[in-house]
Amino acid sequence: MEIILSILFLLMRFFDFLTTPIFKYRSKGARKFLPPLKSDLLRISATELAKKIRNKEISSEEICQVYIDRIKEVNPILNAVVEERFRYAMREAKNVDGYLKTTSLSIRELEKIKPLLGVPITVKECCSVKDLSLCVGLQSRKGFKAETDGEAVAKIRSSGGIVLLVSAAPEMAMAWECYNHVNGYTNNPYDTTCTSGGSSGGEGALLGACASLIGIGSDIAGSVRLPAAFNGVFGHKPTPRTVPLKGHFPIGHDEKYYDFLVIGPLVRYACDFKLIMNAMCGSRIGSELNLYEHVDLSKLNVFYLESLNFNVTLPRVSKEIQAAVRDSVSHLKSHCGAKVHDYKFDEFKNVSVVCGSSIFSLKDIPNVLKGENSLFIVELTKSLFGRSKFTHNLMVFYFFELLFKYVVGDYSQDNAKLKTFIVEKLKDNGVIILPTFHEPAHKHNQAILKNGYAYMIIANALGLPATSIPCGFDKDGMPIGVQVIAAPYQDRLCIAVAEELERHFGGWIPPPEND
């Protein structure tokens, strides 16, 4: 019954084409600009800051205060913060500075035991920070607090990181638009009339606005990489089961859930991926990933895909993003000596159905309606008119879940075959460069008509690591980017390519400021 899905996707393209001018017209004159940066400390990578803190060249207290001040400046414009813990964070920073004055440990020992010592971190609300909100946009959970740290957050804290806040996510983290009825809309720092993406949209907005250095998000269908791309920063989806998921809300009870959902970092500087990934993974997994092992890019096999243009149901990739893919590939070939392969990837012709079916076939996907289909129809209708206690984005998600389960059918065997093919193609020295999304950030409320998510769900459905990389701006000044995908446990290849393309494209560039 793929024909039904194809018709639906074509209708989405048609209505997106019709309504985009309306959304743009309605947002005219509503854009707000961020205040200018007041401290050069905001422009230093976490890796360098951690080193300066260990060497007592700068205090953790000063760094945390600088970031807290920036958050207070930009959050009234962005609406990215759900709940902060600034007072406790400053107390922890002061304790770090006191500890460094008295410890007998050497600089090298400190780097090994507490690599994040004194570095401020922000965390997506879904990832459980003790005593902070764990509502995740549900009105029925308003006021609910995490009783303990999630395991990934606990590892960050044991590595010396200081958590400043929890940030906004869509309702149940099940949308690519960062909006819910509890917190409202989170705005894009490059154009506040546009979305920051989802579901880690609060983190994307804070990092893009230079109000965070390292953000912790989660990704089941692009939810780290899309906000990274929309907000001009880097986002990494790790190999599944490398970063512990305990403490994440929501999560299903199906064991396969752990093959799709991952916790991953967003950073402004690509060098910080290694630092935060090692902290979250722990020593055993970290040693398996070998993130600090040198990657010889001249031995890299580079495949690429400018667009899935052989599938007419999917939207066209913008010319600027296609050019960014070509530019990335050209740079790796001419500057690094990488071997480029012009492979067409016909295997991806039906990727939106195959990969989408694999994710939606998960048992026990968290559902606020508890499987009551009649109630779903009522709430979906009400949500489209703004009368439901649930967002229209969440109801549309459940609509697609039902569609894939009962109409499209099971493509798990096709998904397994595709994974085997891609893993054998890439081996331990190959990557694919392709768009993260088909266009830059769109206006608020357009997400339900955008059908460019196939580029992101490839990595989730196939269990591959993937990194979103900023590549400059489009003609309207909005960030554009590409992503790089590698075989399982080859995260270091993705990160090495990100570091190289950061040098080429310039990486994160601050958003426009008030004069």
Image (cartoon, rainbow, N blue to C red):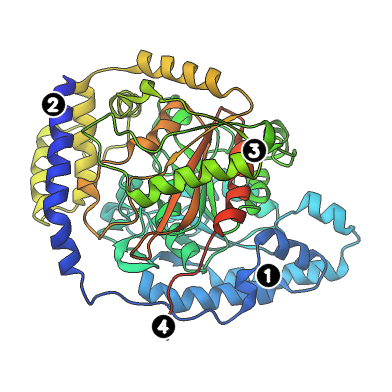
Given the image, on which type of amino acid does mark 2 rest? Answer: Ile
Q: Could you give the CA–CA distance between mark 4 and mark 2, rounded to whole angstroms?
A: 48 Å
Quadrant in the rendering for residue 363: top left
| SS at circle 1 | helix
Q: Amino acid at mark 1?
A: Ala
Camera-near label (3 vs 1) is: 3
Marks 3 and 1, the one that precedes in the sequence:
1
**Quarter occupied by residue 395:** top left
Q: Amino acid at mark 3?
A: Arg
Check if mark 3's residue and mark 4's residue have beta carbons within 8 Å.
no
**Structural distance between the alpha carbons of marks 1 and 2:** 56 Å
Using the image, tell me which numbered label, if any, was put on residue 93: 1
- Residue at 37% x, 54% y is 169
Q: Which residue is mark 3?
A: 492
Report the residue marked by disc 2.
Answer: 4
Is residue 471 in view from this perspective?
yes
Q: Position of residue 40 (x, y in %)?
A: 63, 77
Disc 4 residue crowd, few under 14, some 14–19, many 20+, Cα 10 Å:
few
